[in-house]
Amino acid sequence: MTGEKTVEQYIEEQRFAIMSNPECSNSHYNLATALLGLRKFDEAEEELKEAIRCSPNFAEAYVQLGGICLQRGDIDGCLAYNQQSVKVRAGFAEGFGNIGFVQLQKGNVEEAIAALEKAIKYNSRFIQAYTTLANAYLFNGEPEKSIETGLKALEIDQDFAVAHNNLAIAYLEKGDFEKAAHHCDRARQLGYEVAPEIVREIEGRSNS
């Protein structure tokens, strides 16, 4: 309850700042992120659009609008906003990462790989982009590239469960059942729900 009250106080502060200076894009953006925290998506959307009106190159605001679209199941809207984010700011890793994620959801694997490779080029510590890229390589029938990318993700955070899951699948495809079992076990230890058919196949191979 205390946390919620603090958020409400923060929202009031941002509203007051906007009253004092309606053209401050940061105040509109800050208000929007607080509203998103309360899941007030319609109000947040209006504030993000105001932030962009005040500052048309506000790449983060486009990304947040994309996130609202995703909440509503509008995957094409999400893609369009993230494409706009990288248009207004060259080399914006987060935008490219989101484009890659959405393209993969849409089944456009080559487009996903191209965007995700840009995301990690612009931010070499972007762990979510590495894991999504590893997944995209798997979809594209490139387990070796998937393994290489997954291991890079683990260099950033060795306890990133999704990376272990992807590595388990990639090593399984390569026929390295020992490594597949290791990464499968690690993903499960970290709380990741590995697909039951993957677990069964690894256990079956390990016991044979």
Image (spheres, rainbow, N blue to C red):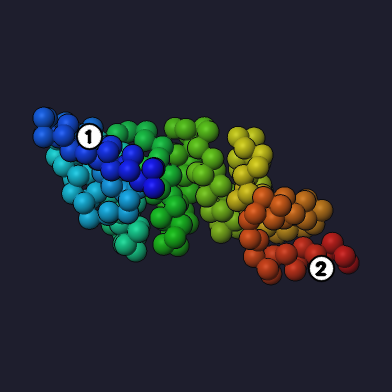
Q: Which residue is mark 1?
A: 13
Who is closer to the viewer here, 24 or 177? 24
* Residue 17 drawn at (x, y percent): 17, 31
Q: Is residue 158 left or right of residue 110?
A: right
* Residue 145 drawn at (x, y percent): 62, 46
Label 2: state its secondary structure.
helix
Distance from disc 1 to disc 2, alpha carbons, whole Å, reads 59 Å
The residue located at (53%, 53%) in the rendering is 136
Q: Nearer the viewer, mark 1 or mark 2?
A: 1
30 lies above or below 180: above
Label 1: state its secondary structure.
helix
* Residue 98 drawn at (x, y percent): 40, 48
Residue 85's mark?
Answer: none
| Disc 2 residue crowd, few under 14, some 14–19, many 20+, Cα 10 Å | few
Instruction: Residue 71: tell me if it is visible.
Output: yes
Q: Is residue 26 left or right of residue 114?
A: left
In which image quadrant can residue 207 be found?
Answer: bottom right
Who is closer to the viewer here, 170 or 38? 38
Amino acid under disc 1? Glu
Instruction: Residue 168: tell me if it is visible.
Output: no
Quadrant of the image for the C terminus?
bottom right
Q: Which residue is mark 2?
A: 204
Amino acid under disc 2? Gly
The residue located at (77%, 63%) in the rendering is 202
| Disc 1 residue crowd, few under 14, some 14–19, many 20+, Cα 10 Å | some
The residue located at (32%, 54%) in the rendering is 39
94 lies above or below 72: above
The residue located at (18%, 49%) in the rendering is 46
Q: Is residue 81 left or right of residue 143?
A: left
* Residue 6 drawn at (x, y percent): 33, 39
In which image quadrant can residue 150 be found?
Answer: top right
